[in-house]
Amino acid sequence: MQNEGVGKVERYSSGGLVMGIVGLVLLAAVMIYGIADPEAGFAPWAYPFCLLLGVLTWMVMIRPAVRLHGDEIELRNPLHTRWVPFAVITSVEIAQVTILRSGEERYVGSGFGRTRRTIRSDSRAAHDTPLEKRSTAWLIEDKIERRIAAARERRTTGDAVPGVRHAWAWPEIALLGVLAAATVVTALVG
């Protein structure tokens, strides 16, 4: 029963993508203007500062997401990523952030969530409310719950379940450090 897009990765985010791209385009325009017009009066520290703002925009607005893979869910946050196998998840809740529980552990993903208004309207909806009247977050939470149930069905008692993986966003962290240092140094020197 792989009719639900299990073979492909599904990406969900809370809408910061468009504003993040607009922010990056505006920062690029400011830098191009500063480079094209040397008499614009840009301070030397403005260029690494614009790049620093661009990296921050990427990290906070564009990078965070919840991605559904075939047998695990990926929680991409600004500074790190976690991959949690569906088979070890005991509960899922999409509030203002996505919260997964696995035994005593709690994993939070800032990439997808509900607004307070959506949380209220979803809590008032009856169990038999038609799907077209449900929120996107409710539908995604339901999809994750079904993937958890399917992973538990496929798992036999002797099967080893892969653990939760974690990776830091080292390229972004390194860029933040380098650009922050470059901004401070050029501000003090120039």
Image (cartoon, rainbow, N blue to C red):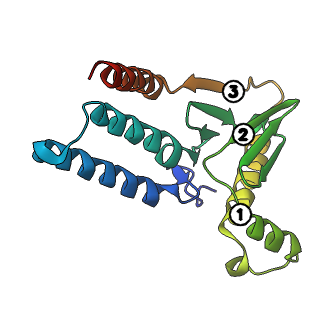
Q: At x 68% / y 55%, what residue is drawn?
A: 113
Percent from the top left, x then y, of residue 98? 71, 48
Helix, strand, or loop for circle 1? loop
Percent from the top left, x then y, of residue 40? 17, 47
Label 1: how many residues lie within 10 Å, few (<14), some (14-19) or many (20+)? some
Q: Earlier in the sequence, mark 3 or mark 2?
A: 2
How far apart, in angstroms, are the residues tagged by discs 1 and 3?
28 Å
In the rendered image, which quarter contains the C terminus? top left
Are the residues at dot 1 and dot 3 in contact (C-beta closer than 8 Å)? no
Percent from the top left, x then y, of residue 135? 70, 71
According to the picture, the residue beneath numbered tag 1 turns out to be 115
For badge 3, the amino acid type reads Val
For badge 1, the amino acid type reads Thr
Between disc 3 and disc 2, the foreground one is 2
Q: Is residue 116 above or below residue 87?
A: below
Q: Quadrant of residue 139?
A: bottom right
Q: At x 53% / y 52%, what residue is drawn?
A: 10
Q: Is residue 80 above or below residue 132?
A: above
In the rendered image, which quarter contains the N terminus? bottom right
For badge 2, the amino acid type reads Val
Percent from the top left, x then y, of residue 167? 56, 24
According to the picture, the residue beneath numbered tag 2 turns out to be 108
Are the residues at dot 3 and dot 2 in contact (C-beta closer than 8 Å)? no
Describe residue 74's horizontal placement relative to residue 47 as left or right. Answer: right
Q: At x 72% / y 74%, what residue is drawn?
A: 134
Describe residue 12's horizontal placement relative to residue 24 as left or right. Answer: right
Helix, strand, or loop for circle 2? strand
How far apart, in angstroms, are the residues tagged by discs 3 and 2?
13 Å
Q: In front here: 146 or 186? A: 186
According to the picture, the residue beneath numbered tag 3 turns out to be 164
Q: In front here: 70 or 47? A: 47
Between disc 2 and disc 1, the foreground one is 1
